[in-house]
Amino acid sequence: MSAAHGSLRVGMIGHAFMGAAHSYGWRNAARVFELPVEPEMAVIAGSDAARSAAAAARLGWAQSVADWRELIERPDVDIVDICAPGDLHFPIAIAALEAGKHVLCEKPLANTADEADEMARVAEAAARRGVFAMCGFTYRRQPAVALARRTIAEGRLGQIRHIRVQYLQDWLSDPDSPYTWRLDATRSGSGALGDLGAHAVDLAQWLTASRITTLSARTQRFVPTRPLPDGSGRGEVTVDDAAFALAEFDSGLIGTFEVTRYALGRKNAFRVEIDGTLGSLAWDFERNNELNLYTEDAGELAGFATVLATRPGHPYLADWWPDGHGLGFDAGFVNQAADFIRAIAAGRQPEPSFADAAQVQRVLDAVEASQASRGWEAVSPEKEKVR
Amino acid sequence: MSAAHGSLRVGMIGHAFMGAAHSYGWRNAARVFELPVEPEMAVIAGSDAARSAAAAARLGWAQSVADWRELIERPDVDIVDICAPGDLHFPIAIAALEAGKHVLCEKPLANTADEADEMARVAEAAARRGVFAMCGFTYRRQPAVALARRTIAEGRLGQIRHIRVQYLQDWLSDPDSPYTWRLDATRSGSGALGDLGAHAVDLAQWLTASRITTLSARTQRFVPTRPLPDGSGRGEVTVDDAAFALAEFDSGLIGTFEVTRYALGRKNAFRVEIDGTLGSLAWDFERNNELNLYTEDAGELAGFATVLATRPGHPYLADWWPDGHGLGFDAGFVNQAADFIRAIAAGRQPEPSFADAAQVQRVLDAVEASQASRGWEAVSPEKEKVR
Amino acid sequence: MSAAHGSLRVGMIGHAFMGAAHSYGWRNAARVFELPVEPEMAVIAGSDAARSAAAAARLGWAQSVADWRELIERPDVDIVDICAPGDLHFPIAIAALEAGKHVLCEKPLANTADEADEMARVAEAAARRGVFAMCGFTYRRQPAVALARRTIAEGRLGQIRHIRVQYLQDWLSDPDSPYTWRLDATRSGSGALGDLGAHAVDLAQWLTASRITTLSARTQRFVPTRPLPDGSGRGEVTVDDAAFALAEFDSGLIGTFEVTRYALGRKNAFRVEIDGTLGSLAWDFERNNELNLYTEDAGELAGFATVLATRPGHPYLADWWPDGHGLGFDAGFVNQAADFIRAIAAGRQPEPSFADAAQVQRVLDAVEASQASRGWEAVSPEKEKVR
Amino acid sequence: MSAAHGSLRVGMIGHAFMGAAHSYGWRNAARVFELPVEPEMAVIAGSDAARSAAAAARLGWAQSVADWRELIERPDVDIVDICAPGDLHFPIAIAALEAGKHVLCEKPLANTADEADEMARVAEAAARRGVFAMCGFTYRRQPAVALARRTIAEGRLGQIRHIRVQYLQDWLSDPDSPYTWRLDATRSGSGALGDLGAHAVDLAQWLTASRITTLSARTQRFVPTRPLPDGSGRGEVTVDDAAFALAEFDSGLIGTFEVTRYALGRKNAFRVEIDGTLGSLAWDFERNNELNLYTEDAGELAGFATVLATRPGHPYLADWWPDGHGLGFDAGFVNQAADFIRAIAAGRQPEPSFADAAQVQRVLDAVEASQASRGWEAVSPEKEKVR
């Protein structure tokens, strides 16, 4: 926990897509930003020793172990970075925090709201001891998104009335693409809902500084079975393929949400549109360096401006490249690592906290409750449970 | 009703925005298209004799009268074109059909589903006598939209899974913009719901050749009172400002809908996105001459194509301008007039029929029912009522 | 010439594409705008009596004649509208002006600069007698273009430094598309240069209120022969297929020009980009209702705004449709007819004059001179020739 | 030079913008790609010892030295990466190659064509000894650009007829922005021409696999003096602010070029449009992950497709992120480092060679010659000079 040695030693669990992205973040954060303490890529853990060792070499970690418990027990690890599948978030995070490690956990925080609430409680207790936990809603770290947040916080859009959020992918559109663990509810918790919906809800709430209170929702499964990779027939898909919601926020704004893995041609179209009393904005990750902004300031010459979110004065960008030299998906992880390190070094709670992420989880729970009840459902408050 | 004299004489009731647009259509239809019979702009009716006479001169009508009943009784009128406010659609249409006139009625067909169903029954009876009625869902006549319909009908998108429809305007965003009859439910029936939602529902159903069966919806009023034009204080807004719905269609597809008059910067953003098993498309009226189309045909070079819907082989365009010379809002009315005249001349039911439009009205009714019940509501079948 | 009878009687020569577009303008001008005098579609002339009569019926003209000289001699014609091929512009315009008719002549004004200069001189003399002539550079009448002109004239872009203009089409891209008169220099004067380049030069000069002084240019013929329609082999293409120029303007700005009929996928991409010391703008006819505008006013939130040129306060639009209801190619002709009629009714020289159009022709001549000399060529001053 | 130790040790000279970007490339190349040998960030050199040491720490280099000659003499350096100002490229590259080091040199290769030709000769001689040199035209490594090259090479556009290239920036638009060494011809050689024009020419030639033979060009200086940073008045700008050219290629295609630092609102708009007999494409760095592609394959549904150049099958992307997760400016340097390392490890000449870069320099020289002569100038062949 101490940074006396000039670095914070990171141990990362999981080394697939998210592990590679997080590694990218740790590798470059102190090279792009002037950080008070540098992250050190100390050790990774995976379930297979040989594959973990290979991943360590490829991704640039000093060592590897085959058991995440071993990683947590090491005294030379200050930060535990959880990139494992969703069903492992809960046990790893609890163990790491109790072992006094700072924790960065990928989203969704957990597979159920109950797990998430418990994790938030444990994190809150740890924070009182100076041990901090954060959830990886990385899209907040895209400069255009952070600029949107700042623009709204400055009041330039006035009071927000509408938000529409879509997170559209198409990788399951083919009904004969193979079965994966992501389609098994016992592993992944849910489908598009947890994977994409968690991002959608977090961004909607963060950008508008308000929270969903009630919603009416629908989930949909388009393809009930898929070919098993071992050729033994077709496996049952037990998660949603898409989810839709109408939502009321505590600020009075109304939101519409759609997340799907079946929108052909939309590769990673995470799109947000927000309309307020003074202006509107729109963002689409497929053009991640652009913020579309409308205000009435220009009178008859008003129109949606394509703001290139690449200026030195925009969030994160004083330390990147000159104006006009846009960033990629990976930059979000570099920015996230820097934000996290700075908070830890300052003894400050990084955002979003586990409590923030648990609230997102309860929104997702309300979606499933609404699907079951076919009515509007309130987002439940954090459950009070003694541990 | 006869075209023996070489023309079909049109009488139009109402001469505001829609009256001007319909006039544009009648004036140009036979000049753009080779029609079997020409429409003749015979007479218009408005509630004020002087203003009607001025409008006739300006819009190019031969005569004017001050009472719509007089217009309907004239033997030298073959077609009655209803551009009056919504509460007059019902009595005018019934009277005109019973007088043996063909009827073109602006949308929404009526202020309630009951009225609309009755109008559909009367129209059905008239059709059996060779007298036809059509509702003016003009966006169907935009070439890019008609091309979208043709593309889907040809099976190029496969089976449709998603549709998302937004009709976004901003003219009420300022809370101090004045009160109008459109904000009074007794005159207009509803707000954004009937005005914009009717278009949204019609286009969604027509493009996908399927119908909404159940929905969960929400309407919203952002500004409860507005300044009365006469300076006597503020009048109460009794209609919705925006409406939102999740909808299930009989074909299994899921739709999300949003219509609003409060999306700053969106002037007439009628947007449709449709995703199928083989491809996707998108259209936005603010770029009305473009159809965005994605299919997997191009393999790794697949991407949304911006199809300029301006080719001679595209719907309506063999008779307009050479490729690349796009059309405007007004062209929809020219195309509509031509379609209507051709159907009448051929003794064929023009589309959309009053029955089609009444079904749209029942969808809008289900929206209001869902707002009241806060649950999913089925779209009711046409009510069987003896007249 | 008198408008005592409340109308100005128009006689139009030529009834192909441009004839249809001009007819559209005359038909709708007084129905969209409140004009002091109405144009009356009196008579058209074509080279074939039967086809002219059919065109008159289709396009809405009262009468037709088979000889343009007859049309010019008629006392019941006040305005002669020249939509005939380029080699006829000169004799018709001269004869019409000398017969005391106002003249609207399609662009390019003539097939050579000498002809054009002579036409300008005759027009100037006629103007002193209250008889006016105008050239049909219709793109000036697109609302977004007129808004661009107004924006620059108001100084919002500061001093202009760059202009880049492209007019890209693709209808000749296929080397086996058939031979037409447009490819025969004796009929058409030139190819893309006169057809597209005339528009490009006119718009560049008009928008920036400055004139080209010298240029270096290149013309290109990609396909030297094409199949003759009668099957008798291939005819020689004697005009340019594309033209390119670098140009210096009297205001010190630099322009780059490209016009071609071989840019596959560009159907009518007339594009202008202008950069000044305070801001920039861009326009593309393929999205004709949008003006892209950048100014530094918004500071760090500056970006190119997509201004929907559909507001009532924008040029021409107070009399068209509500905001957001865009216009088409044809609206330019309606606006042009209205502008012309108003100028004639007011006894005022309409713009662009024949002198303006002759200067454009001299720029095109300089392009051909530069192609021959392979050096920079000055645009010649109007030749002083006694007539 | 040997990779027996499992790594190629890199020494980099210069640590400003380009030094940071190259460091980014070396740091991540072996973490993203599976490379046969890993680059090792061994040492950097700058003119100031303290600043070099700080840069080494920040950018992740093991050591630093204050003299580039010292760096070249070190036996533990295999590769010399030249990110110093343009006037140093020549002496450093020559010395490094003669010392047996592989060289990666930023563009433009040199400040004059003579220097560049000499460097090419030295590099050619070194290559015969297994020592290789490459010039850093990094935009070739943007996936969308590499995909464009592949698409053209596969013949999908047919024979190329047109190319238009613009490289537009705006950072000098304000006439009172301060003087820098980039505006001093003795340091930088030229202005926009060498900085942006070198990229424009390289990409145009590489994409179309053809070379410019003759051109007519114009350079322009908009602001003759600028405030000196030390407050001692205004310094004279001795380089061009913008350059323009019409160019003929050996394949018969025609190109138009414009590069400027004065196009307000264009931050790094490097744009290429290419039209062939079978299709067209367009790319703009401001939307670097998109390739716009038009082919006639789709018949009446043809349109420019926005191909997201983010698919695993696209160049470079099998080793980056899943489809739809776009890359940034920096990825070009990661890809470049990987390409370079692979070529060196394989004993193969990396592309573009110094000879390629020297030819670009001769094109830039022809631009300046044309500006002087006001005529068309041929691009000179490589000068035969005995060394």
Image (cartoon, coloured by chain):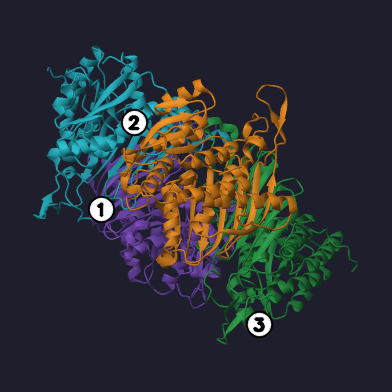
Chain colours: A cyan, B purple, C green, D orange
The quadrant in which the N terminus of chain B is found is: bottom left
Location of residue A33 by image quarter: top left
The residue wearing badge 3 is: C48
Q: Which residue corresponds to the image point at 50% horizontal and 59% vertical from the top-left?
A: D209
In the rendered view, tell whether residue C107 sits above or below residue C51.
Answer: above
Residue D112 makes an appearance in the image = yes
In the rendered view, tell whether residue A357 sits above or below residue C61.
Answer: above
Q: What residue type is labelled 1?
A: Ser
Task: Name the secondary structure under disc 1.
Answer: loop
User: Label 1: how many residues lie within 10 Å, few (<14), some (14-19) or many (20+)?
Assistant: many
User: Label 3: how many residues lie within 10 Å, few (<14), some (14-19) or many (20+)?
Assistant: few
- Quote the CA–CA distance across marks 1 and 3: 59 Å
Give a yes or no on whether discs 1 and 2 share a subunit.
yes
| Residue C142 at x, y percent in the picture | 61, 54
Which chain's residue wears label 2?
A
| Residue D16 at x, y percent in the picture | 51, 31
Left of B176 or right of it: where is A189? Answer: left
